[in-house]
Amino acid sequence: MTYDEVMDMVRSNEAGQWIYNDSKRSHLLRSDVKLRIIKRNSADEPMREFREQWANSHPDPSAYRVHYDIYYGSSFIDEFMLVSVDGDRAELPLPEHQTTEIPRGSYLLARAVDDQGTLDDYIRRSGLTVGG
């Protein structure tokens, strides 16, 4: 399996196609259990506050960086960061620098771990859009 093949699998599967284990903070792909996405343990890497207008404009203005690692079998593949907003009610990808447009690839990664089903609603609430 190549890097590109693994990343295509991640991006082509929505949250409902992953099994989420809260205690392990991991997502396991139902159709290929070698593929998993793991939310880093906050004890290993303390949550860092995040400040941007789009992230801090919710009823709960706190926002934090959340880091994920992608593994295929025992191989580390890649990592990505999302921003937890509104008291952990959603995790959003970063827009392009000095814009409100989220790159499509970043959106697809966030969609894979959107267990709460709040991603699209919070993108709109934040005044962000998804690029093509």
Image: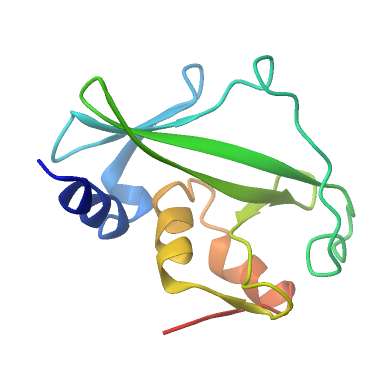
In the image, is 67 to the left or to the right of 59? left
Residue projecting furthest to the left: 1
Residue 76 percent location from the top left of the image: 33, 29
Taking 52 as reference, is 79 above or below it? above
In the image, is 47 to the left or to the right of 15? right
Residue 48 percent location from the top left of the image: 79, 36
In the image, is 96 to the left or to the right of 80? right
Image quarter (top left, top right, bottom left or bottom right) of the N terminus:
top left
Q: Residue at x 84, y 42 (%)?
A: 49
Q: Residue at x 51, y 56 (%)?
A: 117
Image quarter (top left, top right, bottom left or bottom right) of the C terminus:
bottom left
**Closest to the observer, 97 or 48:** 97
Residue 46 percent location from the top left of the image: 75, 24
What kind of colouring is applied to the model shown? rainbow
Taking 42 as reference, is 122 above or below it? below
Residue 31, quarter of picture: top left
**Closest to the observer, 22 or 37:** 37
Residue 42, quarter of picture: top right
Q: Residue at x 25, y 60 (%)?
A: 12
Q: Residue at x 64, y 52 (%)?
A: 90
